[in-house]
Image (spheres, rainbow, N blue to C red):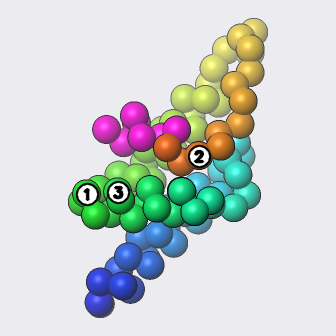
Amino acid sequence: MNQTAESSSYLTSVMTLYVQMSETPMHASLSDQALERWLETCGVPPEIAEAALLLGSIRRLIRPKDVTPLSPVRSQAYFLPVIE
């Protein structure tokens, strides 16, 4: 598989999960796509990026019901601390 196809596969797998999550935008922004390319360039495996999305989402969903709700996620950058 060539590098372009691998990059496309990386973007597709992670972005598909990101836009399907309940509190994320329905479409990935250009900055989200650029962030994905950067993560790939840094050597972050797609499985780690996907796990971070799931973990970050679960952490948001299990918050106590009596606390102020969080605003929707507007950028995939929200999940960078989980990836780190």
Q: Residues within 10 Å of mark 3 (few under 14, many from 20)?
A: some
For mark 1, what is the residue?
Answer: 42
Front residue (pair 59, 10): 10
Badge 1 amino acid? Cys
Q: Residues within 10 Å of mark 2 (few under 14, many from 20)?
A: some
Residue 43: x %, y % from top left: 24, 60
Mark identifier at residue 71: none
For mark 3, what is the residue?
Answer: 39
Q: CA distance from mark 1 to mark 2?
A: 19 Å
The span picked out in magenta is 78-84
Which residue is outermost to the bottom?
Answer: 1
Give the quadrant of the N terminus. bottom left
Give the quadrant of the C terminus. top left
**Residue at (44, 78) in percent of width and height:** 8
Query: Which badge, 1 or 2, comes first in the chain's sequence?
Result: 1
Badge 2 amino acid? Ser
**Residue at (29, 89) in percent of width and height:** 2
For mark 2, what is the residue?
Answer: 75
Q: CA distance from mark 2 to mark 3?
A: 14 Å
The reply, left or right, for residue 12 in relation to residue 63 is left
**Residue at (42, 40) in percent of width and height:** 80
Q: Is residue 58 above or below residue 9?
A: above
Asked if marks 1 and 2 touch (Cβ < 8 Å), the reply is no
Element at label 3: helix
**Residue at (53, 56) in percent of width and height:** 32
Asked if marks 1 and 3 touch (Cβ < 8 Å), the reply is yes
Residue 60: x %, y % from top left: 61, 29
Element at label 1: loop
The reply, left or right, for residue 24 in relation to residue 9 is right
Q: Residues within 10 Å of mark 1 (few under 14, many from 20)?
A: few
Q: Is residue 57 above or below residue 40?
A: above
